[in-house]
Amino acid sequence: MKIRNKGRKKEYDVYAIAFYISDDLEFKDRVVFYVAEDGLFGLAAEGFKDVEIIDPTLGSEFKFHNMDHDKGFIVLWDHFTDINDLARLIDLDPETVAAFEKARAERSIS
């Protein structure tokens, strides 16, 4: 899946999509993408209203994972074993970042 961030007007590959069903959360959806530009790197997230979907294809390399406490679900790129694995990347754990960078470089997106 590929999106264009409306604010930055740049295209990004998607690595996760989260859907929240809990009433106590203000936001209901997030698309997670990777930013490596302008001296910044890491995962970023935007609501679907803030992105334009360029390529809607997820393919077989994405898997569904339920969130704790029935808050919703997340569709993760299969590089991530679970939501906690994704969280370690968000926290910039050095080993997790290195493994992700290697997998991202080897990923072929048609």
Image: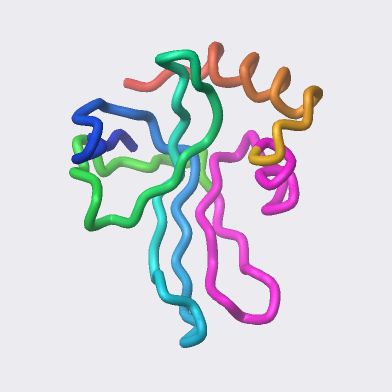
73 in magenta: yes
User: Which residue appears at 69% of the width and 47% of the height?
Assistant: 87
Q: Quadrant of residue 6?
A: top left
> Which one is in front, 4 or 15?
4
Circle count: 0
13 up-or-down from 58: above or below: above
In the rendered image, the vertical position of residue 15 relative to residue 9, given as above or below? below
Which of the pair 14/81 is nearer the observer?
Answer: 14
The residue sitting at 19% across, 30% down in the picture is 9
Residue 65 x, y percent position in the rendering = 61, 60
| Residue 61 pos. (x, y %) | 51, 38
Q: Quadrant of residue 85?
A: top right
Residue 65 position (above or below residue 80): below
Find the residue positioned furthest to the right: 95
Magenta stretch?
Answer: 63-89
> Residue, x 68% and y 36% (percent of image)?
89
